[in-house]
Amino acid sequence: MAFHTCGPNQAMVVSGCCHSSPAYVPGGRVWVWPVVQQIQKISLNTITLEVMSPRVYTKLGVPISVTGIAQVKIEGRNKEMLATACQQFLGKSEQEVQQVALETLEGHQRAIMGLMTVEEIYKDRQKFSEKVFEVASSDLVNMGITVVSYTLKDIRDEEGYLHALGQKRVAEIHKDARIGEAMANADRAMKEALAEEMRMESKYKNDIEIAKAKRDYELKKAEYDGEVNQNRAKAELAYQLQAAKTQQKIKEEEMEVQVIERAQQIEIQKQEIIRRERELDATVRRPAEAEKYKLEKLAEAERQRIVLEAQAEAEAEQLKGEARAFAIEAQAKAEAEQMQKKAEAWKEYKEAAMVEMALDALPKMAAEVAAPFTRGIKEIKMVSTGDGEIGAAKLTGEVLDIMVRVPKMVQDMTGVDINKALRIK
């Protein structure tokens, strides 16, 4: 007994004694009795076939050449197919098996080419491959051969049909390309226009937002500037008001100082009046009284002027009430005292004083009466009727006549008879 083995790419066939039918052992081991049993091996390798079908007329009579690639093998996993393959190819070489499968595939390929157009084969290679695979598999399976795969490798055309078809297709492609390019350009232009529109819309929106922001900025700035100007105006007004108050206070203080100074001056004048009154009392009565009267008049005029100025300034400044009251009080006291002094003086020396004043005034009156004749007169023309004096005597007489009438006018105004007073003296 002998022990035989084979690889997975082979199958052993044992026949003879003890076997009513051959035993098939794909890839394994087996015991064989020499002489009474026989062992044979068959290859299970995959065979690659280049199936060429030159110049085959297709369905529409266009001749083309087709080359396909197929992989076939003897099926070892199915014992029935293996038995069939052993019946067909046992004892033959692998090249012989390859030739049988090649011729079978080439025949089926040619048959499928005759059932399809060039366009169908060219455009749908997968469909062509599937049909060849299907038809060849159903035929080769009866030989125990399995078609592992089939692929269309090449299509050739000696008549230029495929070239023309390609040119047509190229033209269509160029046409489609031009149409596509035009559509793409139109779409691009449309998209560009849309993008430009969106860009301009965005730009306008941005411009609007910028304008709004600028407007808000200007409004805020104007509002802030208004507040700043308002605060500045308030500050300036407050400053001016404070300056005015300060100036007013300074003026008030100056007025108070002036009032005090004037009050002191009034007091000094009062003291001076008292001193002069005493001095006048100690000296000649009438000249002293006349001097006293003169000083009182001057003092009265001065006080009146001071009081009037104080009153005018007090009315202009509302806050000078106290100063005005003080000035009025001082004025009232001074006037009361003055009136009292004057009343006493006039009571005691009324007629004599008036006579004194009239006598003192006579020379002045004479000078005033004669003044028109002495001021700027270069020539005097006098017309006479022939009665009485003429010339300078007439003019002098008229002046003296005016002076003679003066005592009468004094008596009419004051009730004092100057001529009688002069006679008494």
Image (spheres, grey):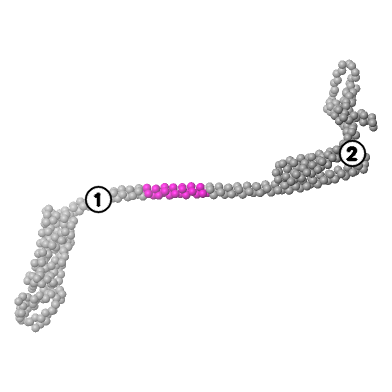
The quadrant in which the N terminus is found is bottom left
Q: Which residue is mark 2?
A: 289
Is residue 45 in sight in this rendering?
Answer: yes
Residue drawn at the location 78% of the way across and 44% of the way down: 329
Res 176 label: 1
Secondary structure, mark 2, is helix
- The residue lying toward the viewer, choosing from 99 and 318, is 318
Q: Give the number of callouts.
A: 2
331 up-or-down from 71: above or below? above
Please rate how many residues cluster around mark 1, counting C-alpha atoms within 10 Å: few if below 14, some from 14 to 19, many from 20: some
- Which tag is nearer the camera, tag 1 or tag 2? 2
Specify the segment rendered in magenta. 196-221
Secondary structure, mark 1, is helix
Percent position of residue 287, x then y: 91, 38
Three-letter amino acid code of the residue under disc 2: Glu
- What secondary structure is the magenta-colored segment mainly? helix
Percent position of residue 106, x then y: 11, 62
Name the residue furthest bottom.
1
- The residue lying toward the viewer, choosing from 213 and 49, is 213
Q: Is residue 94 left or right of residue 401?
A: left
Q: Earlier in the sequence, mark 1 or mark 2?
A: 1
Residue drawn at the location 82% of the way across and 40% of the way down: 300
Residue drawn at the location 28% of the way across and 49% of the way down: 183
Q: Is residue 385 left or right of residue 221?
A: right
Three-letter amino acid code of the residue under disc 1: Asp
Is residue 399 in sight in this rendering?
Answer: no
Residue drawn at the location 8% of the way across and 73% of the way down: 91
